[in-house]
Image (tube, grey):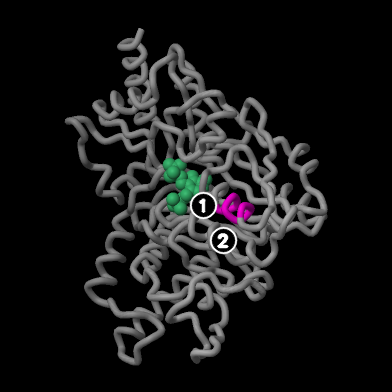
Amino acid sequence: MASVVSAPRDALNVAAIRQDFPILRQRVHGKPLVYLDNAATTQKPQAVIDALQRYYSEENANVHRGVHSLSGRATDAYDAAREDVRRFINAADAREIVFVRGTTEGINLVAQTWGRARVGAGDEIVLTEMEHHSNIVPWQILCEEKGARLRVAPITDAGELRLDELERLLNARTRLVAVAHVSNVLGTVNPVAEIVRLARARGIPVLVDGAQAVAHMPVDVQALGCDFYAFSGHKVLGPTGIGVLYGRRELLEAMPVYQGGGGQIGSVTFDRTTYAPLPYKYEAGTPNIAGVIGLAAAIDYVTGVGLDRIAAYERDLCAYATSALADVPGLRLTGTARDRASVLSFVLGDVHPHDIGTILDREGVAIRAGHHCCQPLMRRLGVPATARASLALYNTRQEIDTLVAALQRVGEVFE
Ligand code: C6P
């Protein structure tokens, strides 16, 4: 961390940041690893690895259950992490932060609790054409159970949301708008505050899938005005298996519980159970304590670097990559929205994206190829799959140059 703090105020000291990520030192197929699959998962700084190691070697105990010292320490660390998350997304109250497994579980929690209680036959849930399956399937399951239906706001050819069309879909039957903050395929940053304004004016709550946003820009849930915001720890330099669901307190208070078990109860008899106050009501069973502590370390790391600086650096790198990729013969970017963050999807002539990914891997370059869990979006784009390079704060222009050179060779092989 000291290395990062010593960077000039505005610029990111990327060379120093890279030193914090041990995995980046390795070679793949004899070439330096160029890790450009950050939208799938990010690499972890030493501070996160150390926090996990420290927890298991010095503090491991169950939380909220023991009177002994170790349990007290683990509980203190766990509770402090919730406050770190609250500050990170500027929630009004730490009780609005529910720990879940990831974005997927956060969205399912809302669908299965708020949704089951509030959505009925003939009701509608509005999504967009660019949603990840995690923000489609939970609503589809709910709609099938309740006789409700999904309405889908279209996007432009550039990959921007048609806000006018989204507004036209809002009506007296609309129960919820569920939208990605940043698309994991197009990189489009959606105008969430504007979407919330349109929905709120009609009394409709908004859920935001923040999986691809939190590592790349400051997020302020109060400024956005959204009712729910879900994200995954592993996409913001934290461990896998931990995530966050933010929910506005009035909504979380009123919703039924999700799962039942230890840690979430007030009292239990065979006739009746009462539940613990927020947020424990939604955290049945022993939580992912190590994950929560690792997530807090990750949040500490990115806030130490500064989300504004990360956003500015990645925007510059994304612009550099966009123009460098334009020089690759036959390459077409799928996603050219004006407001874009950290994700570059593309097709290259007739070359199958999996072949691109496999050849790039031989050059040490890790990208993702496939439908990226966005099959409806692939249909809209008219392609079965794309290749995708996705950036993080530790990527460099030099790595983009390596990517571009490797893609040029792919193009030559398949000519
Ligand atoms: N996208 C990608 O390579 P989980 O799996 O719960 O951590 O995150 C799900 C998810 C939800 N919404 C968006 C916008 C996402 O990008 C993801 C995960 C990864 O694009 C894995 S498919």
Front-most of 408 and 136? Answer: 136
SS majority, magenta: helix
Q: Is residue 310 visible?
A: no
Q: Are marks 2 and 1 in contact (CB under 8 Å)?
A: yes
The front one of 260 and 157 is 260
Q: Which residue is mark 2?
A: 89
How many labels, in total? 2
As displayed, is residue 64 above or below residue 335?
below
Quick one: 103 or 311, which is closer to the camera? 103
Taking depth in this image into account, of 409 and 147 the one nearest to the observer is 147
- The quarter of the picture where the C terminus appears is top left
Task: Determine whether the beta carbon of the residue marked 1 sits less than 8 angstroms from the nearest atom of ligand 1.
Answer: no
Q: Which residues are magenta?
A: 138-144
Q: Which residue type carries mark 2?
A: Ile
Q: Badge 1 local density, few (<14 within 10 Å), some, or many (20+)?
A: many
Residue for point 25% across, 66% down: 53
- Compute the Cα span from label 2 to label 1: 8 Å
* In this picture, residue 16 sits left or right of residue 202: left
Residue 8 appears anywhere in the view: yes
Q: What residue do we see at 53% from left, 30% from top?
A: 378
Q: Amino acid at mark 1?
A: Val
Which percent across, then down, holds residue 348? Answer: 43, 18
In this picture, residue 210 sits left or right of residue 78: right
Q: Is residue 329 left or right of residue 172?
A: left
Number of residues whose C-alpha sits closer than 10 Å to that of mark 2, classed few (under 14), some (14–19) or many (20 or more): some
